[in-house]
Amino acid sequence: MTNPKGRFLANVFPLVAGQAFFQTAGILVAALSGLVGYNLAADKALATLPVAVVSIGTASALIPASMLMKKYGRKRGFMVGIGLGFLAGALTSLGIYLVDFRLFIIGNMFVGAYQGFSQYYRFAAAESVPEADRSKAISWVVSGGVFAAVAGPSIARLTRDIGDIPFLYSYISIMALSVCALAAVSRIRHDTHEAAIQEPAHDGRPLSEILKRPAFIGAITSSAVGSAVMVMVMTATPITMKLCGYNADDSSLVIQWHVLGMFVPSFFTGNLIQRFGAVRVISCGIFIFLLHLSLALSGTAIFHFTTGLIFLGIGWNFMFIGGTALLTKSYANGDRARSQAFHDFLVYAVATLSSFMAGAALDHWGWNVVNLIAAPLLIAAFAVLQWYAMTERKSQVT
Protein backbone atom coordinates (compact mmCIF):
# COMPACT_ATOMS: atom_id res chain seq x y z
CA MET A 1 0.00 0.00 0.00
CA THR A 2 1.36 3.43 -0.96
CA ASN A 3 2.40 5.57 2.03
CA PRO A 4 0.86 9.07 2.31
CA LYS A 5 4.05 10.82 1.20
CA GLY A 6 4.43 8.52 -1.81
CA ARG A 7 0.78 9.03 -2.75
CA PHE A 8 1.20 12.80 -2.44
CA LEU A 9 4.19 12.77 -4.80
CA ALA A 10 2.55 10.38 -7.29
CA ASN A 11 -0.57 12.54 -7.49
CA VAL A 12 1.09 15.93 -7.51
CA PHE A 13 4.38 15.48 -9.40
CA PRO A 14 2.89 15.08 -12.94
CA LEU A 15 0.98 18.30 -12.33
CA VAL A 16 4.17 20.04 -11.14
CA ALA A 17 5.92 18.93 -14.36
CA GLY A 18 3.00 20.03 -16.53
CA GLN A 19 3.03 23.40 -14.78
CA ALA A 20 6.79 23.71 -15.33
CA PHE A 21 6.60 23.21 -19.11
CA PHE A 22 3.51 25.39 -19.52
CA GLN A 23 5.01 28.13 -17.37
CA THR A 24 8.28 28.02 -19.34
CA ALA A 25 6.31 28.85 -22.49
CA GLY A 26 4.40 31.56 -20.64
CA ILE A 27 7.54 33.21 -19.26
CA LEU A 28 9.19 33.11 -22.67
CA VAL A 29 6.16 34.91 -24.11
CA ALA A 30 6.11 37.43 -21.24
CA ALA A 31 9.80 38.20 -21.75
CA LEU A 32 9.70 38.55 -25.54
CA SER A 33 6.20 39.41 -26.80
CA GLY A 34 6.45 43.05 -25.78
CA LEU A 35 9.74 43.37 -27.67
CA VAL A 36 8.41 41.51 -30.73
CA GLY A 37 5.28 43.64 -30.58
CA TYR A 38 7.43 46.77 -30.48
CA ASN A 39 9.20 45.57 -33.65
CA LEU A 40 6.03 44.56 -35.51
CA ALA A 41 3.53 47.25 -34.48
CA ALA A 42 3.24 50.41 -36.55
CA ASP A 43 1.81 52.23 -33.50
CA LYS A 44 4.27 51.72 -30.63
CA ALA A 45 1.51 52.34 -28.06
CA LEU A 46 0.20 48.90 -29.14
CA ALA A 47 3.50 47.18 -28.37
CA THR A 48 2.13 45.44 -25.27
CA LEU A 49 -1.06 44.30 -27.05
CA PRO A 50 0.34 40.78 -27.71
CA VAL A 51 0.97 40.41 -23.96
CA ALA A 52 -2.48 41.78 -23.14
CA VAL A 53 -4.30 39.32 -25.42
CA VAL A 54 -2.66 36.44 -23.53
CA SER A 55 -4.90 37.40 -20.62
CA ILE A 56 -7.89 37.70 -22.95
CA GLY A 57 -7.24 34.17 -24.20
CA THR A 58 -6.91 32.94 -20.64
CA ALA A 59 -10.13 34.56 -19.45
CA SER A 60 -12.00 33.27 -22.52
CA ALA A 61 -10.84 29.68 -21.96
CA LEU A 62 -11.37 29.38 -18.21
CA ILE A 63 -15.09 28.66 -18.11
CA PRO A 64 -15.16 26.33 -21.18
CA ALA A 65 -12.14 24.50 -19.71
CA SER A 66 -13.94 24.01 -16.39
CA MET A 67 -17.06 22.68 -18.14
CA LEU A 68 -15.00 20.35 -20.32
CA MET A 69 -13.11 18.96 -17.34
CA LYS A 70 -16.27 18.51 -15.31
CA LYS A 71 -17.68 16.34 -18.12
CA TYR A 72 -14.57 14.49 -19.34
CA GLY A 73 -12.08 14.79 -16.48
CA ARG A 74 -8.97 16.80 -15.72
CA LYS A 75 -6.56 14.68 -17.75
CA ARG A 76 -8.41 15.00 -21.06
CA GLY A 77 -8.99 18.68 -20.45
CA PHE A 78 -5.30 19.28 -19.84
CA MET A 79 -4.45 17.49 -23.09
CA VAL A 80 -6.82 19.76 -25.01
CA GLY A 81 -5.10 22.76 -23.46
CA ILE A 82 -1.68 21.45 -24.45
CA GLY A 83 -2.93 21.08 -28.03
CA LEU A 84 -3.87 24.77 -27.96
CA GLY A 85 -0.33 25.53 -26.75
CA PHE A 86 1.17 23.69 -29.71
CA LEU A 87 -1.09 25.68 -32.05
CA ALA A 88 0.01 28.90 -30.30
CA GLY A 89 3.65 28.14 -31.04
CA ALA A 90 2.84 27.52 -34.71
CA LEU A 91 0.82 30.74 -35.14
CA THR A 92 3.23 33.07 -33.33
CA SER A 93 6.16 31.65 -35.30
CA LEU A 94 4.29 32.13 -38.56
CA GLY A 95 3.39 35.70 -37.56
CA ILE A 96 7.06 36.54 -36.96
CA TYR A 97 8.11 34.83 -40.21
CA LEU A 98 5.51 36.73 -42.26
CA VAL A 99 6.00 40.00 -40.29
CA ASP A 100 2.28 39.88 -39.55
CA PHE A 101 1.39 41.68 -36.30
CA ARG A 102 -2.23 40.47 -36.37
CA LEU A 103 -1.26 36.81 -36.74
CA PHE A 104 1.26 37.20 -33.93
CA ILE A 105 -1.50 38.62 -31.72
CA ILE A 106 -3.80 35.67 -32.55
CA GLY A 107 -1.00 33.25 -31.63
CA ASN A 108 -0.53 34.99 -28.29
CA MET A 109 -4.25 34.63 -27.63
CA PHE A 110 -3.88 30.86 -28.03
CA VAL A 111 -1.00 31.00 -25.54
CA GLY A 112 -3.57 32.48 -23.19
CA ALA A 113 -6.06 29.70 -23.95
CA TYR A 114 -3.36 27.15 -23.06
CA GLN A 115 -2.83 29.06 -19.84
CA GLY A 116 -6.57 28.99 -19.14
CA PHE A 117 -6.61 25.19 -19.15
CA SER A 118 -3.37 25.01 -17.17
CA GLN A 119 -4.76 27.12 -14.32
CA TYR A 120 -6.56 23.99 -13.14
CA TYR A 121 -3.32 22.11 -12.40
CA ARG A 122 -3.24 23.61 -8.91
CA PHE A 123 -6.89 22.75 -8.25
CA ALA A 124 -6.40 19.18 -9.50
CA ALA A 125 -3.49 18.85 -7.06
CA ALA A 126 -5.56 20.21 -4.16
CA GLU A 127 -8.37 17.76 -4.95
CA SER A 128 -6.03 14.76 -5.02
CA VAL A 129 -4.74 15.08 -1.42
CA PRO A 130 -6.29 15.27 2.07
CA GLU A 131 -7.66 18.67 3.09
CA ALA A 132 -4.78 19.31 5.50
CA ASP A 133 -2.30 19.08 2.60
CA ARG A 134 -4.18 21.27 0.11
CA SER A 135 -2.20 24.48 0.57
CA LYS A 136 1.01 22.45 0.31
CA ALA A 137 -0.15 20.75 -2.91
CA ILE A 138 -1.14 24.11 -4.43
CA SER A 139 2.22 25.55 -3.44
CA TRP A 140 4.15 22.64 -4.96
CA VAL A 141 2.36 22.93 -8.28
CA VAL A 142 3.07 26.65 -8.42
CA SER A 143 6.72 25.81 -7.64
CA GLY A 144 6.95 24.30 -11.12
CA GLY A 145 7.63 27.87 -12.12
CA VAL A 146 11.12 27.62 -10.58
CA PHE A 147 12.17 25.41 -13.49
CA ALA A 148 10.43 27.84 -15.83
CA ALA A 149 12.22 30.81 -14.25
CA VAL A 150 15.53 29.38 -15.41
CA ALA A 151 14.41 27.68 -18.62
CA GLY A 152 12.15 30.42 -20.05
CA PRO A 153 14.63 33.33 -20.15
CA SER A 154 17.48 30.92 -21.05
CA ILE A 155 15.57 29.60 -24.06
CA ALA A 156 14.74 33.19 -25.01
CA ARG A 157 18.43 34.18 -24.95
CA LEU A 158 19.71 31.06 -26.72
CA THR A 159 17.13 31.06 -29.52
CA ARG A 160 16.62 34.79 -30.08
CA ASP A 161 19.33 35.21 -32.72
CA ILE A 162 19.23 31.79 -34.40
CA GLY A 163 18.74 32.16 -38.14
CA ASP A 164 18.07 35.33 -40.09
CA ILE A 165 14.79 36.25 -38.35
CA PRO A 166 15.11 37.40 -34.70
CA PHE A 167 12.89 35.60 -32.16
CA LEU A 168 11.53 33.05 -34.69
CA TYR A 169 13.04 29.98 -33.03
CA SER A 170 12.07 31.29 -29.60
CA TYR A 171 8.42 30.84 -30.52
CA ILE A 172 9.02 27.56 -32.38
CA SER A 173 10.30 26.22 -29.04
CA ILE A 174 6.77 26.61 -27.62
CA MET A 175 5.73 23.62 -29.75
CA ALA A 176 8.55 21.52 -28.27
CA LEU A 177 7.57 22.57 -24.73
CA SER A 178 3.98 21.53 -25.46
CA VAL A 179 5.14 18.03 -26.43
CA CYS A 180 7.06 17.78 -23.13
CA ALA A 181 3.97 18.93 -21.22
CA LEU A 182 1.88 16.25 -22.92
CA ALA A 183 4.34 13.56 -21.81
CA ALA A 184 4.10 14.82 -18.21
CA VAL A 185 0.31 15.11 -18.09
CA SER A 186 -0.11 11.62 -19.55
CA ARG A 187 1.33 10.32 -16.26
CA ILE A 188 -1.56 11.69 -14.17
CA ARG A 189 -2.92 8.86 -12.04
CA HIS A 190 -6.46 7.54 -12.42
CA ASP A 191 -7.41 8.34 -8.82
CA THR A 192 -6.43 11.99 -9.33
CA HIS A 193 -8.70 12.05 -12.37
CA GLU A 194 -11.59 10.64 -10.34
CA ALA A 195 -11.09 13.11 -7.50
CA ALA A 196 -11.23 15.97 -9.95
CA ILE A 197 -14.59 15.09 -11.45
CA GLN A 198 -16.54 13.53 -8.60
CA GLU A 199 -19.19 16.07 -7.63
CA PRO A 200 -22.72 15.75 -6.37
CA ALA A 201 -25.44 15.52 -8.96
CA HIS A 202 -27.12 18.74 -7.77
CA ASP A 203 -26.05 22.07 -9.20
CA GLY A 204 -24.97 23.61 -5.89
CA ARG A 205 -25.72 27.15 -4.76
CA PRO A 206 -26.47 30.00 -7.15
CA LEU A 207 -23.41 31.97 -8.23
CA SER A 208 -24.86 35.10 -6.61
CA GLU A 209 -24.78 33.33 -3.24
CA ILE A 210 -21.21 32.10 -3.75
CA LEU A 211 -20.07 35.65 -4.56
CA LYS A 212 -21.38 36.90 -1.20
CA ARG A 213 -19.26 34.53 0.87
CA PRO A 214 -16.51 36.45 2.74
CA ALA A 215 -13.91 33.75 1.93
CA PHE A 216 -14.65 34.07 -1.79
CA ILE A 217 -14.47 37.87 -1.65
CA GLY A 218 -11.13 37.67 0.19
CA ALA A 219 -9.81 35.09 -2.28
CA ILE A 220 -10.76 36.99 -5.43
CA THR A 221 -9.45 40.29 -4.02
CA SER A 222 -6.08 38.80 -3.13
CA SER A 223 -5.61 36.88 -6.38
CA ALA A 224 -6.91 39.65 -8.67
CA VAL A 225 -5.01 42.56 -7.13
CA GLY A 226 -1.78 40.54 -6.85
CA SER A 227 -2.02 39.42 -10.49
CA ALA A 228 -3.05 42.85 -11.80
CA VAL A 229 -0.14 44.66 -10.17
CA MET A 230 2.36 41.97 -11.16
CA VAL A 231 1.23 41.77 -14.81
CA MET A 232 1.11 45.53 -15.26
CA VAL A 233 4.62 46.13 -13.96
CA MET A 234 6.17 43.03 -15.57
CA THR A 235 4.67 43.93 -18.96
CA ALA A 236 6.09 47.44 -18.81
CA THR A 237 9.54 46.45 -17.55
CA PRO A 238 11.25 45.21 -20.77
CA ILE A 239 10.09 48.26 -22.74
CA THR A 240 11.09 50.65 -19.94
CA MET A 241 14.55 49.08 -19.82
CA LYS A 242 14.85 49.40 -23.61
CA LEU A 243 13.97 53.10 -23.36
CA CYS A 244 16.57 53.48 -20.58
CA GLY A 245 19.27 52.12 -22.91
CA TYR A 246 19.48 48.52 -21.69
CA ASN A 247 19.60 45.64 -24.17
CA ALA A 248 17.39 42.54 -24.45
CA ASP A 249 19.84 40.41 -22.44
CA ASP A 250 19.59 42.84 -19.53
CA SER A 251 15.79 42.77 -19.52
CA SER A 252 15.71 38.97 -19.89
CA LEU A 253 17.97 38.64 -16.84
CA VAL A 254 15.75 40.97 -14.80
CA ILE A 255 12.65 39.00 -15.83
CA GLN A 256 14.45 35.79 -14.87
CA TRP A 257 15.14 37.09 -11.37
CA HIS A 258 11.55 38.30 -11.17
CA VAL A 259 10.19 34.88 -12.06
CA LEU A 260 12.47 33.22 -9.51
CA GLY A 261 10.92 35.61 -6.99
CA MET A 262 7.49 34.49 -8.16
CA PHE A 263 8.07 30.77 -7.73
CA VAL A 264 10.96 29.93 -5.36
CA PRO A 265 8.86 30.92 -2.30
CA SER A 266 6.36 28.24 -3.34
CA PHE A 267 8.55 25.65 -1.63
CA PHE A 268 7.55 27.13 1.74
CA THR A 269 4.47 29.32 1.11
CA GLY A 270 2.14 26.36 1.75
CA ASN A 271 3.84 25.66 5.08
CA LEU A 272 3.59 29.35 6.03
CA ILE A 273 -0.15 29.29 5.29
CA GLN A 274 -0.59 26.15 7.39
CA ARG A 275 1.25 27.77 10.29
CA PHE A 276 0.14 31.42 10.18
CA GLY A 277 -3.02 31.39 8.06
CA ALA A 278 -3.75 32.73 4.59
CA VAL A 279 -4.69 36.26 5.71
CA ARG A 280 -1.33 36.93 7.36
CA VAL A 281 0.60 35.54 4.40
CA ILE A 282 -1.42 37.67 1.96
CA SER A 283 -0.90 40.77 4.11
CA CYS A 284 2.82 40.10 4.08
CA GLY A 285 2.62 39.87 0.28
CA ILE A 286 1.00 43.32 0.12
CA PHE A 287 3.82 44.78 2.23
CA ILE A 288 6.42 43.18 -0.09
CA PHE A 289 4.66 44.74 -3.11
CA LEU A 290 5.09 48.12 -1.43
CA LEU A 291 8.83 47.42 -1.11
CA HIS A 292 8.92 46.97 -4.88
CA LEU A 293 7.07 50.25 -5.30
CA SER A 294 9.61 52.16 -3.19
CA LEU A 295 12.49 50.74 -5.25
CA ALA A 296 10.83 51.39 -8.62
CA LEU A 297 10.28 55.04 -7.73
CA SER A 298 13.82 55.56 -6.45
CA GLY A 299 15.76 54.93 -9.68
CA THR A 300 16.25 53.05 -12.97
CA ALA A 301 19.60 51.38 -12.37
CA ILE A 302 19.91 47.61 -12.89
CA PHE A 303 19.80 47.24 -9.08
CA HIS A 304 16.41 48.98 -8.89
CA PHE A 305 14.89 46.89 -11.69
CA THR A 306 16.30 43.57 -10.46
CA THR A 307 15.63 43.93 -6.73
CA GLY A 308 12.26 45.58 -7.29
CA LEU A 309 11.11 42.84 -9.66
CA ILE A 310 12.21 40.15 -7.17
CA PHE A 311 10.01 41.79 -4.53
CA LEU A 312 7.23 42.04 -7.11
CA GLY A 313 7.45 38.27 -7.67
CA ILE A 314 7.45 37.36 -3.98
CA GLY A 315 4.48 39.62 -3.32
CA TRP A 316 2.53 37.96 -6.13
CA ASN A 317 3.40 34.48 -4.81
CA PHE A 318 2.04 35.21 -1.34
CA MET A 319 -1.12 36.88 -2.64
CA PHE A 320 -1.89 34.31 -5.36
CA ILE A 321 -1.26 31.12 -3.36
CA GLY A 322 -2.92 32.67 -0.31
CA GLY A 323 -5.93 33.62 -2.43
CA THR A 324 -6.17 30.12 -3.89
CA ALA A 325 -6.00 28.60 -0.39
CA LEU A 326 -8.86 30.88 0.71
CA LEU A 327 -10.84 29.89 -2.36
CA THR A 328 -10.73 26.18 -1.47
CA LYS A 329 -12.46 27.09 1.81
CA SER A 330 -15.24 29.05 0.12
CA TYR A 331 -17.17 26.30 -1.67
CA ALA A 332 -18.72 22.87 -1.20
CA ASN A 333 -18.15 20.08 -3.73
CA GLY A 334 -21.21 20.98 -5.77
CA ASP A 335 -19.89 24.54 -6.23
CA ARG A 336 -16.32 23.56 -7.07
CA ALA A 337 -16.17 23.89 -10.87
CA ARG A 338 -18.25 27.05 -10.96
CA SER A 339 -16.33 28.79 -8.16
CA GLN A 340 -12.91 27.92 -9.56
CA ALA A 341 -13.85 29.03 -13.08
CA PHE A 342 -15.40 32.31 -11.97
CA HIS A 343 -12.50 33.11 -9.63
CA ASP A 344 -9.89 32.62 -12.34
CA PHE A 345 -12.04 34.36 -14.96
CA LEU A 346 -12.20 37.50 -12.81
CA VAL A 347 -8.47 37.30 -12.07
CA TYR A 348 -7.53 37.18 -15.73
CA ALA A 349 -10.11 39.74 -16.77
CA VAL A 350 -8.45 42.16 -14.36
CA ALA A 351 -4.99 41.07 -15.59
CA THR A 352 -6.10 41.78 -19.16
CA LEU A 353 -7.15 45.29 -18.23
CA SER A 354 -3.86 45.89 -16.43
CA SER A 355 -1.88 44.71 -19.49
CA PHE A 356 -3.72 47.20 -21.71
CA MET A 357 -3.15 49.92 -19.12
CA ALA A 358 0.58 49.14 -18.96
CA GLY A 359 1.25 50.06 -22.59
CA ALA A 360 -0.92 53.18 -22.60
CA ALA A 361 0.26 54.43 -19.18
CA LEU A 362 3.91 53.84 -20.06
CA ASP A 363 3.56 55.59 -23.42
CA HIS A 364 1.71 58.62 -22.03
CA TRP A 365 2.92 59.06 -18.43
CA GLY A 366 6.01 56.93 -17.93
CA TRP A 367 7.36 54.25 -15.60
CA ASN A 368 6.64 56.01 -12.31
CA VAL A 369 2.90 56.31 -13.02
CA VAL A 370 2.71 52.62 -14.00
CA ASN A 371 3.96 51.79 -10.51
CA LEU A 372 1.93 54.42 -8.66
CA ILE A 373 -1.29 52.94 -10.04
CA ALA A 374 -0.58 49.90 -7.84
CA ALA A 375 -0.70 51.78 -4.51
CA PRO A 376 -4.49 52.31 -4.15
CA LEU A 377 -5.15 48.75 -5.36
CA LEU A 378 -2.90 47.30 -2.65
CA ILE A 379 -4.42 49.49 0.06
CA ALA A 380 -7.93 48.40 -0.97
CA ALA A 381 -6.87 44.73 -0.94
CA PHE A 382 -5.45 45.10 2.58
CA ALA A 383 -8.73 46.63 3.77
CA VAL A 384 -10.78 43.79 2.29
CA LEU A 385 -8.51 41.17 3.91
CA GLN A 386 -8.90 42.82 7.31
CA TRP A 387 -12.69 42.85 6.86
CA TYR A 388 -12.61 39.14 6.00
CA ALA A 389 -10.47 38.36 9.07
CA MET A 390 -12.86 40.28 11.31
CA THR A 391 -15.86 38.45 9.78
CA GLU A 392 -14.19 35.10 10.41
CA ARG A 393 -13.46 35.95 14.05
CA LYS A 394 -17.09 36.99 14.60
CA SER A 395 -18.42 33.79 13.02
CA GLN A 396 -16.17 31.67 15.26
CA VAL A 397 -17.36 33.49 18.38
CA THR A 398 -21.05 33.02 17.48
Image (cartoon, rainbow, N blue to C red):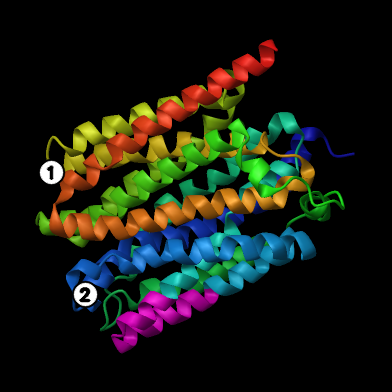
128 sits left or right of 278 in the view: right
What's drawn in magenta, residue-wise?
A: 86-106
Q: Pinpoint residue 162: horizontal percent, then vertical percent.
A: 30, 76
On the image, numbered disc 2 is attached to which residue? 39
Residue 230 numbered mark, or none: none
* Residue type marked 1: Thr
The reply to whether residue 31 is in sight is: yes
Q: The disc labelled 2 sits on which kind of residue?
A: Asn
The residue depicted at 29 percent of the width and 81 percent of the height is: 163
Q: Residue furthest top?
A: 397
Picture coordinates of residue 173, whole percent (x, y): 44, 72
- Tag 2's secondary structure? helix
Residue drawn at the location 49% of the way across and 49% of the way down: 145
Quarter of the figure with the C terminus:
top right
Is 95 rendered above or below residue 261?
below
Which disc, if any, is residue 300? 1
